[in-house]
Amino acid sequence: MTEATWHSVAAKDDVAPDEPIKVEVGDTEIALFNVDGEIFATSNICTHAFASMVHGFQEGDEIECPLHEGRFSIKTGEALCPPVSEGLRTFEVKIEDGKVLVKA
Ligand code: FES
């Protein structure tokens, strides 16, 4: 496995509150979320079936899957209710010169 490195994936202003966006690092789809002005990154693919989290419904620091309404914590990736039991992978984020960098 290659070591994770920082990737510039978006401008911070591209990530509006409650409007997550999808970015890609290699083959990895990552969802970026704005929670109270802070940016967080998780895997974009639900752990239950193949659904894109950016098409889900963000409410504060939770994201609801668009397919079967499983919910995850955006900050920790934790699975919060059935049918999801496995958490989403999360990625470290930092902001530099208005850009969002993700460690992946
Ligand atoms: Fe996400 Fe089923 S695919 S809850």
Image (cartoon, grey):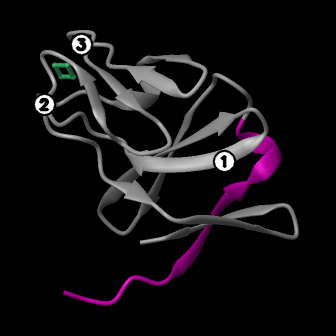
Secondary-structure class at tag 1: strand
x, y (%) of residue 10?
Answer: 68, 56
- Is residue 14 located in the magenta-colored stretch of the structure? yes
Where residue 53 appears, as percent x and y from the top left, is 38, 29
What is the distance, in whole Å, between disc 3 and disc 1 at their CAs? 24 Å
Please tell me whether mark 2 sits on a helix, a strand or a loop.
Answer: loop
Rendered image: mark on residue 67 = 3
Residue 12 in percent (x, y) is at: 77, 51
Amino acid type at image mark 2: Ser
What crowding class fits label 3: few (fewer than 14 Cα within 10 Å), some (14-19), or many (20 or more)?
some
- Quadrant assignment for the C terminus: bottom left
Residue at figure coordinates x 44%, y 23% from the top left:
63
Q: Quadrant of the N terminus?
A: bottom left
Q: Which residue is mark 1?
A: 39
Nearer-N-terminus badge (3/2): 3
Mark 3 C-beta closer than 8 Å to ligand 1: yes
- Gap in angstroms between the C-alphas marked 2 and 1: 24 Å
The count of marks equals: 3
Question: Which of 9/71 is in front?
Answer: 71
Residue 88, magenta (yes or no): no
Task: Name the residue carrying label 2.
Answer: 85
| Amino acid type, mark 3 | Leu
- Ligand 1, seen in the image, is in the quarter at top left
